[in-house]
Amino acid sequence: MRSLIDILELSAEEIADLVATAEDIIANPQKYAEACRGKKLATLFFEPSTRTRLSFEAAMYELGGQVLGFSEAASSSASKGESVSDTVKVVSCYADIIAMRHPKEGAPLVASMKADVPVINAGDGGHNHPTQTLADLLTIWREKGRFTDLTIGLCGDLKFGRTVHSLIAAMSRYANVKFVLVSPEELKLPSYVKKDILQKKGVPYAQTTDLESVMPELDVLYMTRVQRERFFNEDEYVRLKDSYILTPEKLKTAKDSLSILHPLPRVNEISVAIDDDPRACYFKQALNGKYMRMALILKLLGVEV
């Protein structure tokens, strides 16, 4: 039995297989419509989420399976003080696979050690969000046709943005990838990510506070929101939240082939005027997340189609 807690648990070959499965699901949805008939997914969301939870649910329904679970800690026995370990032990009796989001880093890892069924980390604090990274990877693959030879700009909250950390870890395995890190000083990429991933693997990167100066060189621009819930100080949040707002004006020097990604939810960091720009990929990215979660559920349940 296998779980997915961190994107690096998947080899480059396994990611290629998941991408191929997702592409096949997109091309032949009917072929997969009964693949998980009789199987149940439990969504244990101790932290609110719209997209990730609904995406997992849609994925399981489109595979012919069923879904049970809760969407916030207050509606679970956690509100009575039940431990994560006990919750997953019990839920393992009712479901074949678990998708879990938790505000505490490491909670899904603990769950995977105690559960009797596969556990998928659907986001743990500021730490990991592997299925968002799978959505990002499928989007890059479908837009670019490759994972190599890319300059990827990451903009906004690089300090607390778990999606950014996971994407850097995943993309740093491919040849000739360069990262451009765009953020305010206070929200720079943590030094451990730079040291353990970028420097260790010799991946080139540049840091700047100015998005417009680097725009012409980017193949992919990954925007993130400055997250209020990760700040201890409201004044700091207010001061930094509008640091980087992507507007048509700022895209004037960008490549025609640029792909703009965002893990969503968006607050105001991408102007709605960009939504109709052919380079905007964030809504496609949300859809791609469903297909990659379908592929992952099949893989972890060992279902052959």
Image (cartoon, helix red, strand yellow):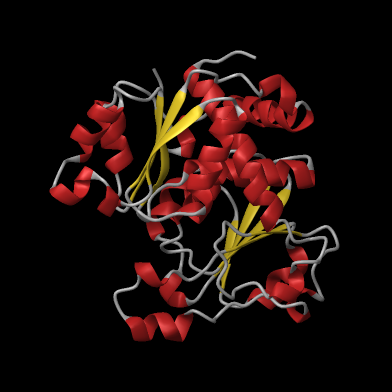
In the image, residue 12 above or below residue 53: above
Q: Residue 114: in sight, yes or no? A: yes
Q: So how many labels did they put on this image?
A: 0
Name the one closer to the observer, 93 or 237: 93
Residue lying furthest left: 81
Residue 188, horizontal then vertical, whole percent: 46, 68
Find residue 213 and report its image quarter.
bottom right
- Which residue corresponds to the image point at 83% horizontal and 57% vertical from the top-left? 257
- Which residue corresponds to the image point at 64% horizontal and 24% vertical from the top-left? 17
Residue 199, horizontal then vertical, whole percent: 49, 50
Find residue 58 and report its image quarter.
top right
The quarter of the picture where the N terminus appears is top left
In the image, residue 109 above or below residue 132: above
- Which residue corresponds to the image point at 17% horizontal and 40% vertical from the top-left? 83
Q: Residue 104: in sight, yes or no? A: no
Residue 191, horizontal then vertical, whole percent: 40, 59
